[in-house]
């Protein structure tokens, strides 16, 4: 039986040191776990550890953490140089590129490394958890643990069950998320789960208005903020990253049998093709000075 004690103070491994991975590492470290961080891109995990150290220092300056909290969190972080170094993890959370084949290959590699009771969680925004677990010896340990951006600030976590996910695994992740100060909801492995199912038409209509040149990004954002939302859709897409947002739209569109309501936008594809990825590349709908991507405090 999987329960919360399986995870308490035990090592958590995060794979993918990008926008989401860094935030997940921060939350797991501050919850008291030793954390392994691995990224296939040379130097990415080490750079993320430096970025995280700067974030923790800023939190200490603001009085939100003590210098001892910062020192112990930093000491618990291990930058791994190979997947083999994750073998003692009780939980692996992958936050790599939104591509089913790549995630499936990673899960297969992990199964050969981790212990039999290690839970394999995916932070996918839209891909089928059933499909991510396909072909594994123990598909019941695969579950969606879908955080929102920026991870330390956003409370929601969708705990996504695929056809094979053991209910005890989903329940344990739900409890763990609560233990980490998050509000967890159970969701099923339907395209986009709950939030991205609702959010896709929001982005699609925004991108359609831009394509029609009906309004600029600044006007669209001002309108939506004026209507009571905390962020406008253009600034939100810049925060998410247009490469990730476009991949999620494509995945939800395909998974809904090419329903026109979820059709990806030419505007966004052009931005991805041009490397205008949003905050993480310094330019999306808006321009960002260096360092503006660091939103985790
Ligand atoms: P990102 O592009 O910022 O970072 C992905 C990282 O994964 C990169 O550093 C890349 O080098 C690494 N990577 C790629 N393939 C790998 C592999 N096979 N092994 C190890 N590392 C690998 O992406 P982001 O935005 O952090 O998204 C990651 C995941 O989180 C995606 O599944 C995405 O859908 C999901 N997500 C993203 C949100 C967002 O707002 N950006 C929100 C919620 C979920």
Image: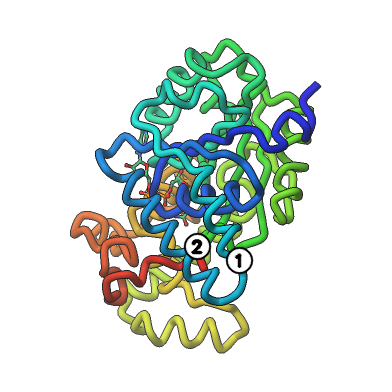
Where residue 249 appears, as percent x and y from the top left, is 44, 51
Marks 1 and 2, how far apart at CA? 8 Å
Indicate left or right for 164 with 122 as reference.
Answer: right
The kind of secondary structure element at disc 2 is helix
Number of marks in picture = 2
Within 10 Å of the Cα at label 2, are there few (<14), some (14-19), or many (20+) other Cα atoms? many
> Where is ligand 1, by quadrant?
top left
The quarter of the displayed image where residue 59 is located: bottom right
Looking at the image, residue 221 lies above or below residue 196: below
Q: Residue furthest front?
A: 68
Q: Residue furthest left?
A: 274
Residue at the spot x=73%, y=55% of the render?
183
Relative to the observer, which residue lies in front, 36 or 209?
36
Residue that label 2 marks:
56
Where residue 128 appears, as percent x and y from the top left, is 55, 34
Which label belongs to residue 65? Answer: 1
The kind of secondary structure element at disc 1 is loop
Residue at the spot x=63%, y=37% of the render?
189
Dots 1 and 2: beta carbons under 8 Å?
A: yes
Return the disc, 1 or 2, that comes first in the chain's sequence: 2
Within 10 Å of the Cα at label 1, are there few (<14), some (14-19), or many (20+) other Cα atoms? some
Looking at the image, residue 288 lies above or below residue 52: below
Indicate left or right for 50 with 24 as reference.
Answer: left
Quadrant containing the N terminus is top right
Residue at the spot x=46%, y=68% of the render?
295
Relative to the observer, which residue lies in front, 108 or 57?
57
Where residue 225 appears, as percent x and y from the top left, is 54, 84
């Amino acid at each position: 039986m999987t329960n919360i004690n399986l995870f308490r103070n035990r090592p958590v491994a995060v794979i993918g040191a990008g926008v989401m991975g860094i935030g997940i590492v921060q939350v797991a470290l501050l919850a008291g776990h030793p954390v392994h961080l691995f990224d296939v891109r040379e130097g990415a995990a080490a750079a993320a550890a430096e970025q995280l150290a700067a974030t923790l220092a800023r939190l200490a300056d603001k009085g939100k953490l003590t210098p001892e909290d910062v020192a112990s969190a930093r000491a618990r972080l291990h930058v791994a140089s190979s997947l083999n170094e994750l073998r003692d993890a009780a939980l692996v959370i992958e936050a790599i590129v939104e591509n089913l084949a790549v995630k499936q290959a990673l899960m297969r590699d992990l199964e050969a490394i981790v212990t039999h009771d290690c839970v394999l969680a995916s932070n996918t925004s839209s891909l089928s958890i059933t499909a991510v677990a396909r072909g594994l010896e123990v598909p019941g340990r695969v579950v969606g643990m879908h955080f929102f951006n920026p991870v330390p600030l956003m409370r929601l976590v969708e705990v996504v069950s695929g056809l094979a996910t053991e209910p005890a695994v989903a329940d344990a992740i739900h409890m763990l998320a609560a233990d980490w100060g998050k509000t967890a909801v159970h969701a099923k492995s339907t395209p986009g789960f709950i939030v991205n199912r609702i959010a896709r038409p929001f982005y699609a209509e925004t991108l359609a208005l831009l394509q029609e040149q009906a309004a600029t990004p600044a006007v669209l954002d001002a309108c939506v903020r004026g209507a009571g939302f905390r962020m406008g859709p253009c600034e939100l897409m810049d925060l998410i990253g247009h490469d990730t947002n476009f991949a999620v739209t494509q995945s939800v569109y395909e998974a809904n049998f090419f329903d026109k309501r979820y059709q990806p936008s030419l505007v966004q594809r052009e931005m991805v093709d041009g490397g205008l990825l949003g905050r993480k590349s310094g330019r999306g709908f808006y321009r960002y000075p260096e360092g503006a991507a660091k939103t985790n405090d």
